[in-house]
Amino acid sequence: MFGNGVPETGVTEVPEDGYLLDVREDDEWSAGHAPRAVHVPLGRLDERADDIPRDRKVYVVCRAGGRSAQAAAALNRAGWDAVNVSGGMQAWERAGLDMVADTDGEPRVI
């Protein structure tokens, strides 16, 4: 559990078919993200909440784990089953997991 009571999981424990929600900013997303992730910046979470499924666990990721913990806590308070992905995309990259970029460069975490 994260310090605020949010359940956590490691990057290698996110199921292949799990709903992965990336709450980073647009430039961070464009530089590199998980191929199957859904992008909803943290600042737009309230307005885009209806896009997030309530019938399955939501794995929330950001750069290092702070914003995703905030997002997971907010989702859980509103009735979702959300889990923070500890270490964020930095841990994802270190683990050598697949990443894609929306730019011509190599995917990277910024």
Image: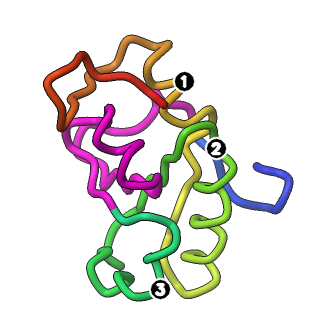
Q: Residues within 10 Å of mark 2 (few under 14, many from 20)?
A: many
Image-quadrant location for residue 86? top right
Q: Is residue 60 above or below residue 107?
A: below
Name the outermost residue toward the left: 104
- Quickly name the residue at label 3: 46
The residue that appears at 62% across and 37% down in the rendered structure is 64
- Quickly name the residue at label 1: 91
Magenta residues span: 10-39
Residue 88 is situated, as x and y percent measured from the top left of the image, at: 55, 37
Q: Is residue 90 above or below residue 40?
A: above
Q: Residues within 10 Å of mark 1 (few under 14, many from 20)?
A: some
Residue 94 is situated, as x and y percent measured from the top left of the image, at: 50, 13
Q: Is residue 55 above or below residue 11?
A: below
Mark 3 or mark 2, which is nearer the start of the sequence?
Answer: 3
The residue that appears at 36% across and 65% down in the rendered structure is 40
Residue 56 is situated, as x and y percent measured from the top left of the image, at: 34, 67
Q: Secondary structure at mark 1?
A: helix
The residue that appears at 14% across and 24% down in the rendered structure is 104
Q: CA distance from mark 2 to mark 3?
A: 19 Å
Name the outermost residue toward the right: 3
Q: CA distance from mark 2 to mark 1?
A: 9 Å
The count of marks equals 3
Say which amino acid is labelled 2: Gly
Mark 1 or mark 2, which is nearer the start of the sequence?
Answer: 2
Callout 2 touching callout 1 (CB < 8 Å)? yes
Is residue 49 within the magenta segment? no
Q: Residues within 10 Å of mark 3 (few under 14, many from 20)?
A: few
Say which amino acid is labelled 3: Asp
Q: Secondary structure at mark 3?
A: helix
Residue 18 is situated, as x and y percent measured from the top left of the image, at: 30, 49
Q: Secondary structure at mark 2?
A: loop
- Quickly name the residue at label 2: 65
